[in-house]
Amino acid sequence: MVMGMYVRIAGRVEVNAASLNAQGTSGNLIELAKLRVVVPESGTYRLFEVPTVTGNTIKHWHFVHFVNAYTMLGGQKLCDYCKRGIGYRSPEDKANEESFVKDCAGEDVHGFLQPDNQVRRESLFKASFMLPIEEVESGFDTMTHNRVVIDTEGKVTREGMMIFKRQYSSSIYGFLMSLDLGYIGRLLYSQEHWQVIDDDEELKRGKAALVALLPLLAGEVGASRARALPAWRVKELLVAWSENPIPQLTHGRYSDYVATSLDVLAAHSDLLGINVNVLAYGVDKKLTDSFEKLKESGSGKLVMIEIKDSWQSIINSLVQKYEHLKSKGKTASATVSAEKQGESAPASARFRKRKE
């Protein structure tokens, strides 16, 4: 196990008039990405088709924002593909994970696959599909558009006019994400998880991964935003972090996601005796009620709750906590290093130091 910062995120966003994730065309119709979800009905269950934004889309845009933030923080370790915001099966002929992690922050944080040499790294950022919440019925609308081409005389030929249709949806979407910052710059598949980058580089990569959450949650995600920039706002945000690995939260689709997330965190904290910090926005009543129940049951004594006035302040707080952890870790490493140097000095030198 590697000590670090492990972040778990769940929440809800209101999205109106959006076409963020298409799944192709049928004739002249551009269809939204849709899937079926389980819905309770009259004591049983049925499958209901809903619009969605895929985890692949969310992960891609976090990657793009990560690369931008990392570059702005002075980071320079990026491969040619990551510099262009392209997550790609790496064609680089490297034989091991260490080479990729050292040379590219994008492949360190977001993972990679080198198919020829069968070298891979799992992403430290994970994202669910965005799904409409249980309490709101969801659907989609189809609108007709047309493209017009005018010649130099101002005329429109029949061939210069093309009608096409595109689907749009509006809903409140739940989501789920996580970041395992403790493994930044470390080898995932070695037993010791050796660190292969220096502390300053690790700080840049970890901070960039957290900063990238800001544009992502502000709505910089998905396709078709040039002509259908959605009316988007964060409604609720629940974030848990710890210096030790912790379970995922419950997906924001579910009406009881705050209570069930707290229950799981409290049980995990109680069993292992670890501290868990919870930051929340927009869920005051749900959070306080759930926390009161935990206290009455004597559970979750190591779970700390903090309610924020804005979701942006949660991201800011995470960055500050991460910087503090890295600073504390650097100080501890320097102390250990100094002690080891003292132990390795000749006995006569150690004796002289004590006499002085």
Image (tube, rainbow, N blue to C red):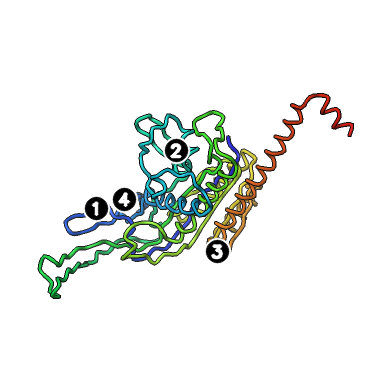
Circles 3 and 1 in contact, beta carbons < 8 Å: no
Name the N-terminal-most of marks 3 and 1: 1
The percent position of residue 323, horizontal first and vertical second, equals 61, 50
Name the N-terminal-most of marks 2 and 4: 4
Image disc number at residue 310: 3
Residue corresponding to mark 1: 24
- Report the Cα–Cα distance between label 2 and label 4: 27 Å
Q: Residues within 10 Å of mark 4 (few under 14, many from 20)?
A: few
- Report the Cα–Cα distance between label 2 and label 3: 32 Å
- Report the Cα–Cα distance between label 2 and label 1: 28 Å
Residue at disc 1, secondary structure: strand
Q: How crowded is mark 1: few (under 14 residues within 10 Å), some or many (20 or more)?
A: few
Circles 2 and 4 in contact, beta carbons < 8 Å: no
Circles 3 and 4 in contact, beta carbons < 8 Å: no
Q: In this view, does 79 lie to the left or right of 195?
A: left
Name the residue: 64% across, 50% down: 324
Name the residue: 21% across, 54% down: 25
